[in-house]
Amino acid sequence: MDNNPKPTFESAFDKLNELTSALESGELSLKEMVESFEEAVKFSRFCLEQLDDAEKRIVKISESEDGIKEEPLD
């Protein structure tokens, strides 16, 4: 992920799903499992950051003159 341009949330989430499936398959060598796990952690953190940013934007959009109206997202 580091050498490529920044992925979109959707592409990162798809890659995370691919890596998870590969890890769950039990068909990877130990070395491949560790490398896949490291890559999955990077994609997971990226996705979490993107979701956090989106939530902050939604809260900001919900601001009113009286302050912030924080409502749970369904």
Image: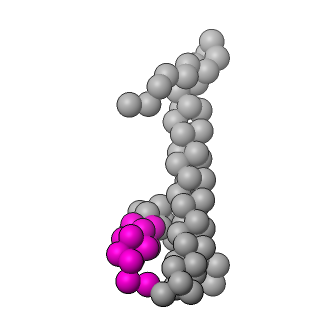
Report whether residue 70 is seen: yes
12 part of magenta stretch = no
Q: Which quarter of the rendered picture does the C terminus lie within?
A: top left
> Looking at the image, which is closer to me, 36 or 52?
36
**Residue 5 picture location, percent across and down:** 58, 78
Residue drawn 57% across the image and 78% down it? 34
Residue 43, by quadrant, is bottom right
> Looking at the image, which is closer to me, 52 or 40?
40
Whether residue 22 sits left or right of residue 9 in the image: it is: left
* Main secondary structure found in the magenta portion: helix
> Looking at the image, which is closer to me, 4 or 60?
4
Report whether residue 6 is seen: no
Check the image and report above or below for 66 versus 14.
above
What segment is highlighted magenta in the picture? 14-28
Check the image and report above or below for 22 versus 71.
below
Residue 67, by quadrant, is top right
Residue drawn 42% across the image and 68% down it? 20
Residue drawn 48% across the image and 87% down it? 29
**Residue 26 picture location, percent across and down:** 39, 77
Residue drawn 56% across the image and 31% down it? 59
Q: How many numbered circles does the render carry?
A: 0
Check the image and report above or below for 28 versus 63.
below
17 part of magenta stretch = yes
Q: Which quarter of the rendered picture does the N terminus lie within?
A: bottom right
